[in-house]
Amino acid sequence: GAVVSQHPSWVICKSGTSVKIECRSLDFQATTMFWYRQFPKQSLMLMATSNEGSKATYEQGVEKDKFLINHASLTLSTLTVTSAHPEDSSFYICSAKGGGWNEQFFGPGTRLTVL
Amino acid sequence: GNSVTQMEGPVTLSEEAFLTINCTYTATGYPSLFWYVQYPGEGLQLLLKATKADDKGSNKGFEATYRKETTSFHLEKGSVQVSDSAVYFCALRGYGQNFVFGPGTRLSVLP
């Protein structure tokens, strides 16, 4: 089946620094990628949708200047959390759609802790 | 807007016990309904889905029936195994819309 990977699986950073999270579709071309955020014991909340080669579409309430999304190729999307603060600590999950499937395939998630 | 409510966990069962995880939803129109499972250290995997009222999704011994009259999509399995220990997410997606997920229910099955 289709596999989506994320890197890193967990990261700890200092407040004020930027962190980049990668999402890769390993065996298919992802025309659309999605970024979710999950707080403890809460739902996955969609942050943004990105189509390869175009700007991401952000959900209401998500700061686009803080969460920079780049979908430069059909197998890679990146989420950069700029000037991270402790309240940005969360579990970030990406998913990808493409390869002729109508289904989304999810990555394993990245746990971000900002000190 | 659309929303999904799941029973709070964690749910702890003995092996071979019967499992029910309740899921109810609020949506306009006729969404598709899904159950995803997340095993430790892995991504969400589609477990089963149903696209219209009275459809039954099934996979790996799990079943769920799309009940429009009660706006529910409860997940059931007749005999759970230790390997079923995971977090289960109920979700819906309206036509042309994005997923809306429930908060997840952690299941622990003891040998």
Image (cartoon, coloured by chain):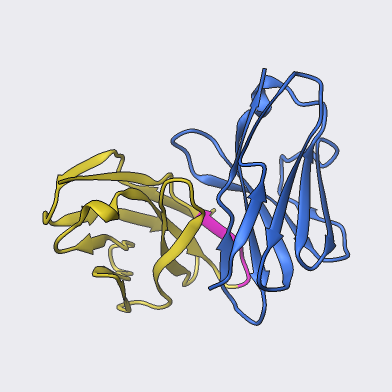
Q: Residue at x 35, y 77 (%)?
A: B53
Q: Is residue B22 visible?
A: no
Horizontally, residue B79 falls left or right of residue A61, namely left
Specify start and end residues of the magenta stretch as a single range.
Answer: B96-100
- Chain B as rendered: colour: yellow
- Chain A as rendered: colour: blue
Residue ranking furthest to the bottom:
A100
Frontmost residue, A30 versus B54: A30
Q: Position of residue A106 (x, y in %)?
A: 57, 58
Q: Residue at x 68, y 57 (%)?
A: A34
Q: How many discs mark residues in the rendered view?
A: 0
Q: Position of residue A22 (x, y in %)?
A: 73, 49
Q: Is residue B102 visible?
A: yes
Q: Residue at x 23, y 51 (%)?
A: B82
Quarter of the image for the C terminus of chain A: give it.
Answer: top right
Q: Position of residue A102 (x, y in %)?
A: 59, 77
Q: Position of residue B27 (x, y in %)?
A: 47, 61
Up-down: is A77 above or below B107? below
Q: Residue at x 11, y 54 (%)?
A: B17
Q: Quadrant of residue A16?
A: top right
The kind of secondary structure the magenta stretch mainly shows is: loop
Q: Quadrant of residue B98?
A: bottom right
Horizontally, residue B51 falls left or right of residue A75, namely left
Up-down: is B18 above or below A61? below
The question of residue B102 being in magenta is answered with: no
Horizontally, residue B11 falls left or right of residue B87, namely left
